[in-house]
Image (cartoon, grey):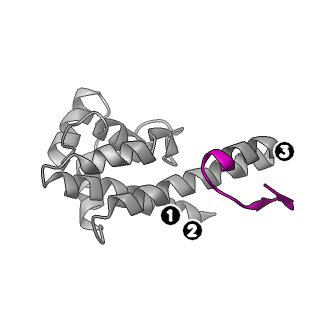
């Protein structure tokens, strides 16, 4: 489970970093397209209390920026009272660890991880019908619990 959590957090950092890098080109495409693909609640840490919910807080602030570059995002976090100690260095880490700026690919990975968590939660609750609805609305076709959906 730790490896999946690490992979999820890495994908979320990459999404945040790629949006900031792409936004440096004064192009709103990254945040506008990401907004269509990923909701703040898709982030692994959205249920956590601050300051542990850093990716959720950053993305929430980014969605309210026209050009969510690093400084604009930090300023918006400050304005929204979402900025905590070490958040600025974390924003830099999101950029420095970035392999490329393919924000759409990272957004899709974040969305898929979120979907997996939702399906696992519903499966634990025995809500097979809700899993089918969720998967159908997302365009996912699979077999869950031995039942073709």
Q: Secondary structure at mark 3?
A: loop
Residue 56 among magenta residues: no
Residue 143 image point, x, y percent: 78, 62
**Considering depth in this image, is 52 or 141 the residue closer to the camera?**
141
1 vs 3, front mark: 3
Q: Marks 1 and 3, how far apart in space? A: 27 Å
Is 125 left, or right, of 111 in this rendering?
right
Q: Are marks 1 and 2 in contact (CB under 8 Å)?
A: yes
Say which of 76 and 119 sits in front.
119
* 88 vs 15: above or below: above
Q: Residues within 10 Å of mark 2 (few under 14, many from 20)?
A: few
Number of disc labels: 3
x and y, in percent, of residue 123 in the image: 78, 49
Q: Is residue 113 left or right of residue 30?
A: right
* Residue 25 in the image, given as x and y percentages of width and height: 13, 55
Residue 139 in the magenta stretch? The answer is yes
Q: CA distance from mark 1 to mark 2?
A: 5 Å
- Residue pointed to by mark 1: 6
Density class for disc 1 (Cα within 10 Å; few <14, some 14-19, many ≥20) is: few
**Number of the label disc, if any, that sits on residue 19:** none
N-term mark: 2 or 3:
2
Quadrant assignment for the C terminus: bottom right
The residue drawn where x is 64% and y is 56% is 140
Whether residues under marks 1 and 3 lie with C-beta atoms below 8 angstroms apart, the answer is no
Residue sitting at x 54%, y 38%: 47
> 44 or 90, which is in the foreground?
44
The residue at which mark 2 appears reads as 3
Q: Can residue 113 be seen here?
A: yes
Which residue is label 3 attached to? 126
Report the span colored magenta: 135-149
Mark 3 closeness class: few <14, some 14–19, many ≥20 residues within 10 Å? few
């Amino acid at each position: 489970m730790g490896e999946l959590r690490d992979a999820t957090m890495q994908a979320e950092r990459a999404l945040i970093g790629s949006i900031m890098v792409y936004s440096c080109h004064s192009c709103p495409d990254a945040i506008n397209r990401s907004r269509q693909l990923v909701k703040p609640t898709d982030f692994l840490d959205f249920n956590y209390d601050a300051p542990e919910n850093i990716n959720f807080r950053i993305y929430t602030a980014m969605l309210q920026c026209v050009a969510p570059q690093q400084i604009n995002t930090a300023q918006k976090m400050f304005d929204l009272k979402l900025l905590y100690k070490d958040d600025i260095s974390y924003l830099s880490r999101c950029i420095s660890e970035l392999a490329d700026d393919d924000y759409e690919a990272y957004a899709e990975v974040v969305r898929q991880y979120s979907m997996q968590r939702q399906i696992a939660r519903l499966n634990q609750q025995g809500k097979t019908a809700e899993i089918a609805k969720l998967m159908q609305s997302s365009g996912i076709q699979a077999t869950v619990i031995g039942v073709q959906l």
